[in-house]
Image (tube, rainbow, N blue to C red):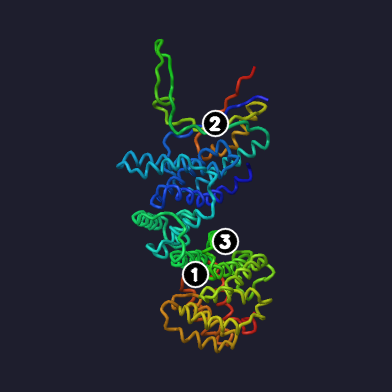
Amino acid sequence: MTEAAPALEDLFRHEAGKICAWLVRLLGPGRLELIEDAVQDAFSAALAQWRFEGTPQRPAAWLAIAARNKALDRLRREMRLESLDPSDEAAAWRLGFSNPEDTGKPDDTLALMFVACHPALGDEEQTMLTLQTVCGFNARQIARAFLSTPEAVTQRLVRAKRRLRDLKLTVEIPEGAELAGRLPGLLNAIYQLFTGGYTAAEGDQLMTEQRCAEALRLVRLLCEHPHASTGETHALAALICFHHARAAARTGATGDVVLLAEQDRARWDAGLLARGFGHLRRAMAAPELTALHLEAGIAAVHASAPSFAQTDWPALVHYYEALIELKPTPVVKLNAAIAQGYADGPAAGLAQLDELAGSTQLSRYAHYHAARGDLLLKLGRRAEAGAALRQALECPLNGAERDYLLRKLRACSTPARQAHS
Amino acid sequence: MPSFMLLLHRPLERGPMADPEAVARVTRDYMDWADRTRAAGRLKAGSKLTDDAGRILRNAGGRVATTDGPFVESKEIVGGYFLISAGDYAEACRIAAECPHLKYGSYIEVRQVEEL
């Protein structure tokens, strides 16, 4: 009984997604709003009641029953107000006879993901709705991840749910060609969930880790589904495993950024890396070669290097060249240039970076200026390096990144011998 | 060991639940206290009461008169109770004084249960 107490918020978050997926199966995606409200009602009731009575023996079942009853209350209230719809009656019956032990079925979660990632919604709405309904984050937490306000997030989620209701969707995992058509949308939402989590623009360590963990959980669900486990799905799983394995080593004792070069590789999660390579093998066994394959391959090169100095930079340059063919974004080109800087020397990398100088996206991207500063510093052009780093500091950054750049900037004004340390 | 009833009074009007995370923290404080008290073998029971003011029954000249709430003019109700065991009032009050209700609610009424 006592062990559940410190993890109350975690318990709620984990159960919220399961209960929501279960109730969406019973009531349909058109009632997402009602379901979310019912789950919130159930949690409020739990908070008020558990104060006095302690955590029940089976808190998950308690919450599922409470949410079901609250949903039934709300449904009956709606039925009295609006015209009698036989589907409401049927839904009420299904709820009444449902078994709360049925929560937590992977297929329900997958079906809900297909609802949340419906192509009628924009990319950001899909990710937000997945965070809310499948992962159980509240508007405040989602707002932190999207650098928005809880009110604005709530507004967008309400609109997204109304749009889904108007589409009169059914809840099911699509099959055949439809599944193949919808899968990239799901993978993209998970990719956003993870990359947004991987480098949270606003320093929020806990949210970052939770988002990565959720992305991993969801992609593994897809990997276990017989028709969703394509090569691309496994490539995404591999990519997330490789990056997530480094999570602990990415942050120093005081929350500061530890760059790849300085990370203690012994702190990488070996089990997760092994799983990553397992997914990568499955990904490579498939006939198609997608951008995710190449991104996973790049992550695998880093994951398999015994030390930063022993990184196979030519292999990375090769992967990046192939990736630019499939995904010619400025950020990919930036990373290709950085890899080239290591493979062929700082001057070659800098030449590549300077070719990208016209990109408006990169001009506001701190990593671009930071990479230039780094290469200029290596070339001993310290005044120019300082200018580049100052430009980086004017871009949006999280606190840890800012601290790192300030340290680097100080190195520009110290003797060259120390600047390389 | 004697039993004591802790009646947790709180304001009748409660604002909307502002911040779910803050509410969860408050709840965890209560649960931590309950866990500690239970682990010490002192907490016997507890329940939340419904959020209304309840009913009062009175004998009005041989007829039962039912009214809402404890007192019409009262601004506080009992939101819940705990039943604890303690050696005496002094110890019961020491246990109750640790309860986070004094921080978040209003006041705690401590009453000893009469035993034969």
Q: In front: A211, or A119? A: A119
Q: Residues within 10 Å of mark 3 (few under 14, many from 20)?
A: few
In percent of the image, x 34 and y 41: which residue is there?
Answer: A79
Residue with the most extreme front position: A176
- The answer to the question of whether label 3 and label 2 lie on touching residues, with beta carbons closer than 8 A, is no
In percent of the image, x 65 and y 32: which residue is there?
Answer: B42
- The answer to the question of whether label 3 and label 1 lie on touching residues, with beta carbons closer than 8 A, is no
The circle drawn on residue A308 is none
The picture places residue A109, in percent across and down from the top left corner, at 50, 55
The picture places residue A68, in percent across and down from the top left corner, at 47, 42
Which residue carries the number 1 mark? A397
- Horizontal side of A342 relative to A87 (left or right) equals right
Q: In front: B40, or B111? A: B40
Quadrant in the rendering for residue B44: top right
Q: Amino acid at mark 1?
A: Leu
The picture places residue A175, in percent across and down from the top left corner, at 46, 62
Q: Mark 3 against mark 2, which lies toward the viewer?
A: 3
Q: Is residue B89 above or below residue A144?
A: above
Labels 3 and 2 within one chain: no
Q: CA distance from mark 3 to mark 2?
A: 48 Å
Which residue carries the number 3 mark? A224
Q: Amino acid at mark 3?
A: Glu
Residue with the most extreme top position: B62
Chain name for mark 1 = A
Which residue carries the number 2 mark? B81
The picture places residue A39, in percent across and down from the top left corner, at 46, 46
Q: Mark 2 against mark 1, which lies toward the viewer?
A: 2
Q: Is residue B6 above or below residue A305?
A: above
Q: In front: A115, or A190? A: A115
Work out which quarter of the rendered image holds the C terminus of chain A and state it: bottom right
